[in-house]
Amino acid sequence: MNRILKILFVLLVLRPIVLIVLGLNVKNRNKLPMNGPAVIAANHNSHLDTLVIFSLYPLSKIHKLRPVAAADYFLSNKLLAWFSLNVIGIIPLSRSGEIDKGKLFSGCHEALDAGDILILFPEGSRGEPEKTGQLKKGIFYLLKDRPDTSLIPLVTHGLGRALPRGEALLVPFNCDVVVGDKLPVPDTSGDLIMILNQKFTQMLNLCPTFHEEE
Amino acid sequence: MLNTIPVNSLYVMLAVAGLLVLASLVVYGLKVINHDKDYTELQQRVTSWWWMIGLLFVFLLLGGNYIIAFFGFVSFLALKEFFSILPTRQADRNVLFWAYLSIPLQYYWVSIGWYGMFIIFIPIYMFLFIPMRMVLKGEVDGFIKAAGIIQWSVMLSVFSLSHIAYLLVLPVQNNLAGGAGLVLYLLFMTQLNDVSQYVWGKLFGKHKIIAKVSPNKTVEGFVGSLVTITLVSSVLAPYLTPLNMMEGIVAGLIISSAGFIGDVVISSVKRDLKIKDSGSMIPGHGGVLDRMDSLLYTAPLFFHYIYYLYY
């Protein structure tokens, strides 16, 4: 049932919006992981980030896509919670720090064990539009004991112009998506953050709508 | 619902379809002869031509408001591409939204044939409204540059392009060609000009015209195309437009030189932004602006040439 809802949502709502209102320039679409367990680490500027990644996948694969999303935000009211859990299929993550580190990622591990593809935003929050914020270390702790899981960096640009945080008006812009090569997971969290930061900057420079002075 | 296309326009559409078939056969032949060479881009280009011309013809056949809305949608794609490649301020998001809203209005004026409004709406009302709306937001850092970018984008992608649609609502003077004849004439000559500049340049090109902007543009390409287009325009003019052969010569000169200028103006924009293509929507061609660049100049200039002579 949920799988059907998700497919209908992508087909009838998401794809028309992404195709007509937005318009995408996609680089290296063939590098997207089609099978899990995998983690897509993306920069975060807008709610559209997740939705655009959804639109890149064939309908037969989208039930495998699981965005990791803040529980305090997406479960804050009933309607949003129902939509996030049942249509989008998010894995809620607590940001409060009250939950024990070992259990924090249990939902993520379950999904990865089932061969799902996680969408993770290491910035944690959308932050200022079109600026990459400080990356968080959580992604390292999720991946360090999982050699079976591939890590793929992905960068979007322009979505923070189309629909930034705190705005309800969607303004049409062409947006860029760049998919990167699979990354190895180094031994320390600091190294991983450094590598991801480097990759994000490199990939942003490949975007035709990106300007140096930003 | 189907619009009956006047006979001359119909024949030209069939001829264009024939050219497409020929192009596809040539690409297929090339692939068979040298199968170790990569013809992907050429193949993509031809496939995209099928799509673009196919869509245009379907909407021309539907006629009426459908074809006007079709050109409105093309304006939308062009404007979106401008706003996407140019730097815009986060504070101007609402202003950009208003700029998009000018598209349905402008094409509405076209659909009801209100020439007076069509011709002043963007250069007067939108021109004055956009900075006012920006002031209401109150962000003064980069105000001049931002206003310039928005005005420029709206003028080229909405005002210029809407002239193509207005050709369809002008009173018909050449009954055998109709409004569709004018549109086909303009589009066909403009695109043929692009192709013939390229071919003449490849064959005989030596002296660069403006090396800084576009290394592929040569004096030989420009002159060769100017002569070709003038000849073809002159022959086709009485067939598709109210113009006689002499007036067709001038139309050819306008389309060929204006097409060249439109091309290099958009090239300069891309050079400034240090990008090669304005987008990736049309495989093998790049973005909408990469394909429409010449038309941004030829459409209004051709329109006002025939408007002055005949309407």
Image: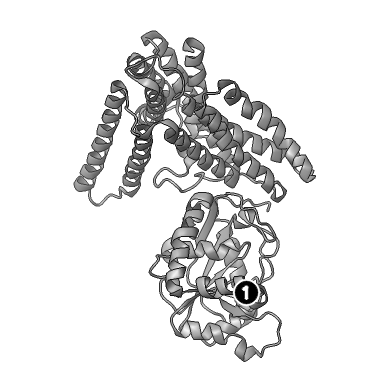
Query: Height in image: A120 above or below A24?
Result: below
Q: Secondary structure at mark 1?
A: helix
Q: Chain of mark 1?
A: A
Instruction: Give the residue at mark 1.
Output: A78
Tell me where residue B176 appears, x and y as whole percent: 32, 17
| Residue at (32% x, 27% y) in the render | B4
Tell me residue B74's x, y (percent).
48, 38
Left or right: where B61 falls relative to A74: left
> Does B25 sit above or below residue B177?
below
User: Quadrant of the rendered structure where residue B227 is?
Assistant: top left
> 10 Å neighbourhood of mark 1: few (<14), some, or many (≥20)?
few
Residue found at the far front of this picture: B1
Residue at image location 50% in from the left, 65% down from the top: A180
User: Which quadrant of the structure image shows residue A139?
Assistant: bottom right
Q: Residue at x 62, y 74 (%)?
A: A78
The residue nearer to you, when weighing B89 against B286, is: B89
Q: Is residue B118 above or below residue B286?
A: above
Left or right relative to A13: residue A77:
right
Residue beneath the point at 41% across and 75% down: A35
Amino acid type of the residue that numbered disc 1 sits on in the rendered structure: Lys
